[in-house]
Amino acid sequence: MNVLVAGGAGYIGSHAVKQLIAEGHRVVAADNLYRGHAPAVHPKATFLKIDLAETTALSEALRREKIDCVMHFAALAYVGESVAEPLRYYDNNTAGTISLLKAMRASGVRRMVFSSTAAVYGEPESTPIVETQRRQPINPYGWSKWFVEQILHDYAAAHPEFAFAALRYFNVAGAAADGSLGEDHDPETHLIPVLMQVALGRREKVTVFGADYPTPDGTCIRDYVHVEDLCNAHIAVMNALQPGDTRCYNLGIGRGYSVREILASAERVTGRAIPHEFGPRRPGDPAVLFANVEKIRNELGWSARFTEIDAIVATAWKWFEKHPEGYRP
Ligand code: UFG
């Protein structure tokens, strides 16, 4: 298939580009390089520096490249930043996707695999979270994604040939097993990369945000899914999409690890002590988030291959050890 990967120079998008190429697809990686990295784009992909807001240029590219499906990863994804700058999030994530859909409509592209988030559930009613659980985001980031899911439903209802899948990610983690790609965010706020930076001595210590949660060890529990498993799920979903499909799936491993467990794993994997301190809770962090992943398993036969946290952390460590400066030469 001819696939346009929006956000193809980002953390997850770049892994998707690599896997699509490995499976024989022709890939156009589109990215505005605001937070993406040009060196992360696979050399066999066609790179297009473009912003989601450039509807006409996007539509020309979709037509010229005879695109069959869009995988849409291009988004701002910091919860805290979304609270401080909501308009940027609605502009880039929500209005940006409307622009992309307009471009798809103008060029006759009828398939989209959309990166959604567990943040659409907000404070969960119960765990594990099933896809039908109430969607009630608690920050603009989650709303910006949930609005897109709703827009996709409305668009699909009006255009029966259109098909989409919204994939609700839990905590995406790890790096390409061959060490070629990984996470390079500035600022870095995610737990596993922060731990790797502490292990490398690039940060002094990690602060554990809250040790008084109602969980067995007092720290938050999350569902960490390996980035390559996540990208495999995208390809499985893309291959399954039929005209008129409106699908949504949780993407996780279906079990949770606490912050203390991740810290212990990082110490085992790196063989280094990781200095840490316990601080107050971070506002907006639910105590426990993990996915029920039965739906995608039953419908598409997909499940994560990486289910043990040490194996996930080991891939992140391989990347950080080899590339302490990320993509900077
Ligand atoms: N944590 C720390 N110290 C740190 C960083 C994180 O204790 O320095 C804790 C957090 O409090 C949380 C856990 O580690 O309990 C994971 O935090 P991350 O920041 O790595 O990830 P989040 O769970 O906050 O966010 C992820 C995605 C978001 C998405 C959200 C869905 O990165 O994009 O899941 O709930 F919105």
Image (cartoon, rainbow, N blue to C red):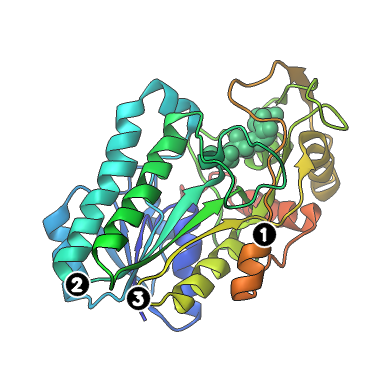
Characterize the local packing of mark 2: few (<14), some (14-19) or many (20 or more) Cα atoms within 10 angstroms.
some
Residue on which disc 1 sits: 293
Query: Where's residue 63, x and y in %?
Result: 17, 73
Residue on which disc 2 sits: 108
Three-letter code, disc 3: Pro
Q: Is residue 281 left or right of residue 262?
A: left
Give the residue displayed 74% in from the left and 55% down from the top: 314
Quarter of the image where one finds residue 227: bottom right
Above or below residue 253? Residue 2 is below
Characterize the local packing of mark 1: few (<14), some (14-19) or many (20 or more) Cα atoms within 10 angstroms.
many
The residues bearing labels 3 and 1 have C-alpha atoms spaced at a distance of 24 Å
Characterize the local packing of mark 3: few (<14), some (14-19) or many (20 or more) Cα atoms within 10 angstroms.
some
Quarter of the image where one finds residue 38: bottom left
Quarter of the image where one finds residue 82: top left
Three-letter code, disc 1: Val
Which of the pair 95/280 is nearer the observer? 95
The answer to whether any part of residue 209 appears in the image is: yes
Residue 111 badge: none
Residue on which disc 3 sits: 243
Q: Residue furthest bottom?
A: 24
Q: Earlier in the sequence, mark 2 or mark 3?
A: 2
Query: Where's residue 188, x and y in %?
Result: 54, 35
Q: Quadrant of the N terminus?
A: bottom left
Under circle 3, the secondary element is loop
Give the residue displayed 63% in from the left and 54% down from the top: 319
